[in-house]
Image (cartoon, rainbow, N blue to C red):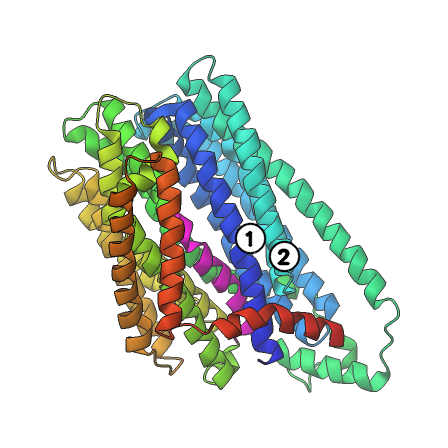
Amino acid sequence: MSKAKNGFIFGAIILVICNLVTKFLSAIYKVPLLRVLGSEGLGQYQMIFPIYALFLVISSSGIVVTISKLTSKQLEVKNYTNAKRYFFAGFLLSLFSSTILSVLLLILSPALSKFQANSNLTKSYIAIVPAIIFGSLMTALRGYFLGKKKMGYSGLMQIIEATSKLVFSLSFAIFFAKKSYFSAVFGAILGLSVSEMVSFLFSIMLYLFSKNKEKRKYTSMIFNKKRRYFLCKSSCVCDGFNEKKYNVKNRYISFFYALKKVVTFSFFVMMQACAIPLVSAVDSLIVVPLLLKTGLSQAISFSLYGLEDGIVSSIISLPTFVATAIGASIIPNIKKENANNELTIKNIKNSFSIVWLVSIFCAFVFLFFSKEIIIFLYGGGLTSFAVNELQIASDLLKINSFNIIYLSLIIISTSILQALEKNKAPVINLFCAAILRTFFLLILVSSKKVNIYGTAICDMVFYSFALYLNLISIRRIVQFKLNINKLFVLPTISCLVMSIVMKLFNSLLYGYISSRFLTMIILILGVVLYYALLCITKTINTKEILSVWGKNKRIKITN
């Protein structure tokens, strides 16, 4: 295995593990939060959170990819000055944009609360404002670490952020719950802002530690004039400079040039990243009013929305940690100028394969064991007698199960397009799909027979159509073929066999042990059996997976 390939796989593995821990902490966070707020309170919390997520994405998402990509290019030619200027330009842009958006949210909060038919949400909108600023600045630091291929630092920041949210948001929610559940929602939101502030301070400490470590490492390095000229030449070509116009003295870019390039590069990345949060924000604004028009009460409408967006959507997003991690790892490792070389094609094929194998497993598990999973995670918090929360959540999870595949593949395909510097393509694709989804949403959710289930159907239309358009965009640039039999047929058969065996064991052991313990046993059995079937069918190469850690250690030693 080459050093480049090994670095990509090892970096992806680190991010997968960190994202798994982060998603696990996020899922744990929702369990006690549901018990404190109830489904109605969670519904109100979820009316605030998508708006916050949208504002955070606008101010920060493009910065992560941009800093990662531009920093990676400069570090390849050892131009640390330009790398730092790109970082500081991105950091400043995050600060400016997040401040503007925070002020905008303060101004709009009364109108948003009124539109959502709940004036009590105004205070919560005000409480979430600091989280936008601190969260945006922290993502700039994450992009810098990703560009330097320090995946462990980036992953550690995510874990600290999730842990802080778990501790502070829950603590504040419990403290304020003594007054009312409205106050509990406010407390959870306020705790979220506090957690972002704490996470940002930790990120600054991590950055300073990394900076001091590098300073010690490179103090003794002295470059001769010939080496410096070579680096200048490489840097100029990499950054799009005219070699004849810029000489050795001008090999360093200005801060304003860096800022201009960060702004132009990040704009379409930000637009793409806004698509899914924008969909959630639209849902938070119109789903409850649409449910009210069907004749449902306000309490039931909030509960249904809380089940769909607060519980089911959170579960659906759990398996996407693999796609997110691989996507973040692949961006610095794919170059537009090498789009059709063997290593690039292999990285793309491996990325699709890993994401597909994980997502199809989760889709089958969620389809056949939806009720067991809901009980395992949230059973104790589903106490409302107004609606059958357990059954509704279970049905929503079944309908959404295969959206795991679509969503995961959208994430990885979008990352590939960004790495190939085709930032406009996923923007256009996602917004076309979002328009189609909104059309179906207005029709289905307002129907008395469909109501909240319409959101799951609309998500399926949205994700599948956007994925189809993304794959067409990639095939126009990179000529690669996937093994249909090995990648699709054999894993599908393996999942069917696994599901049947899991159902059989569940039937045999049901009633003899507690339901939650039985669910854990069945899930572990499913993972082991699925992996064994993939090995038997030679869908995955176990030796290559096991060799990653050892080879990475040898590379570090020789360097």
**Which image quadrant: the C terminus?**
bottom right
Label 1 packing within 10 angstroms: few (<14), some (14-19), many (20+): many
* Picture coordinates of residue 465, whole percent (x, y): 25, 62
* Picture coordinates of residue 229, whole percent (x, y): 78, 84
Question: Closer to the N terminus: mark 1 or mark 2?
Answer: 1
From the viewer's side, name the closer residue of 84 and 461: 461
> Which amino acid is tagged 2?
Gly
Q: Is residue 214 above or below residue 396?
A: below
> Which amino acid is tagged 1?
Cys
User: Which residue has dot 2 on it?
Assistant: 152
Quarter of the view holding residue 452: top left
Q: Is residue 327 magenta?
A: yes
Q: Is residue 350 magenta?
A: no
Whether residue 331 sits left or right of residue 311 in the image: it is right
Disc 1, disc 2: CB below 8 Å? yes
* SS of the residue under disc 2: helix
- Residue under the image location 62 percent in, 75 percent down: 239
Q: Main secondary structure of the magenta part?
A: helix
User: What label sits on residue 18 in the rendered view?
Assistant: 1
* SS of the residue under disc 1: helix
From the viewer's side, name the closer residue of 384 and 480: 384
- Residue under the image location 70 percent in, 77 percent down: 77
- Identify the magenta region: 317-334
Quarter of the view holding residue 50: top left
Q: Is residue 188 above or below residue 11?
A: above
Quarter of the view holding residue 424: bottom left
Label 2 packing within 10 angstroms: few (<14), some (14-19), many (20+): some
- Residue under the image location 46 percent in, 44 percent down: 55
- Residue under the image location 51 percent in, 28 percent down: 170
Task: Give the spatial CA distance, label 1 vs label 2.
Answer: 8 Å
Whether residue 280 sits left or right of residue 191 in the image: it is left
